Amino acid sequence: MKTKIISAALLLGVLSFASCKKDYTCTCTTVVGTASTTETHSISNATHNDAKNTCDNYQTQANNALPGGTTCHL
């Protein structure tokens, strides 16, 4: 019985460190003067950190390509 409890605890510990992948939506808003546009990007089957990095890259690319300011968030 004690072995089963220890095994179950170890299994739960290992599963808690596993990364859950899911779908995210990155929303980017670009403001030029008084006009603003909003664009969404789907990020599929990614960890939160990977989705955050991808969203940050969308923001960087938009700010390099367009005048004005673009902010993106998950």
Image (spheres, rainbow, N blue to C red):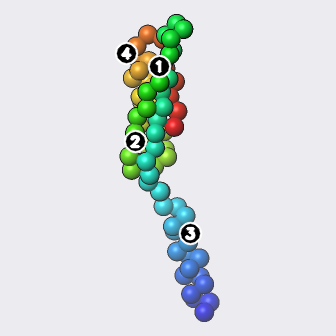
Residues at marks 1 and 3 touching, judged by CB atoms closer than 8 Å = no
For the N terminus, which image quadrant?
bottom right
Whole-percent x, y for residue 62 in the image = 41, 21
Q: Callout 4 environment at 10 Å: few (<14), some (14 to 19), or many (20+)?
A: few
Which of the 4 image quarters holds residue 51? top left
Determine whether label 4 and label 2 are within 8 Å by CB: no
Q: Which residue is drawn at 55% across and 75% down?
A: 10
The picture places residue 74, in percent across and down from the top left corner, at 51, 37
Q: Give the mark toward the camera: 4 or 3.
A: 4
**Mark 1 sits on what residue?**
37
Instruction: Say above or below: 33 vs 63.
Output: above
Of marks 1 and 3, the one in the foreground: 1
Marks 4 and 3, the one that precedes in the sequence: 3
Location of mark 2 (residue): 43
- Residue at 39%, 50% (x, y): give it: 45
Residue type of the residue flagged with mark 1: Thr
Decide which of tag 2 and tag 1 comes sooner along the chain.
1
Label 2, secondary structure: give it.
strand
Is residue 53 in view from this perspective? Answer: no
What is the distance, in whole Å, between disc 2 and disc 1 at their CAs? 20 Å
Is residue 63 visible to the viewer in this orientation of the structure? Answer: yes
| Residue at image point 57% right, 88% down | 3
Secondary element type, mark 1: strand
Q: Name the residue under label 3.
A: 13
* Residue occupying the point 43% across, 48% down: 23
Marks 4 and 3 sit apart, C-alpha to C-alpha, by 45 Å
Q: Position of residue 41 (x, y in %)?
A: 40, 34
**Circle 4 is placed at which residue position?**
65
Which amino acid does the dot numbered 3 rest on? Gly
Q: How far apart are marks 2 and 3 (CA)?
A: 28 Å
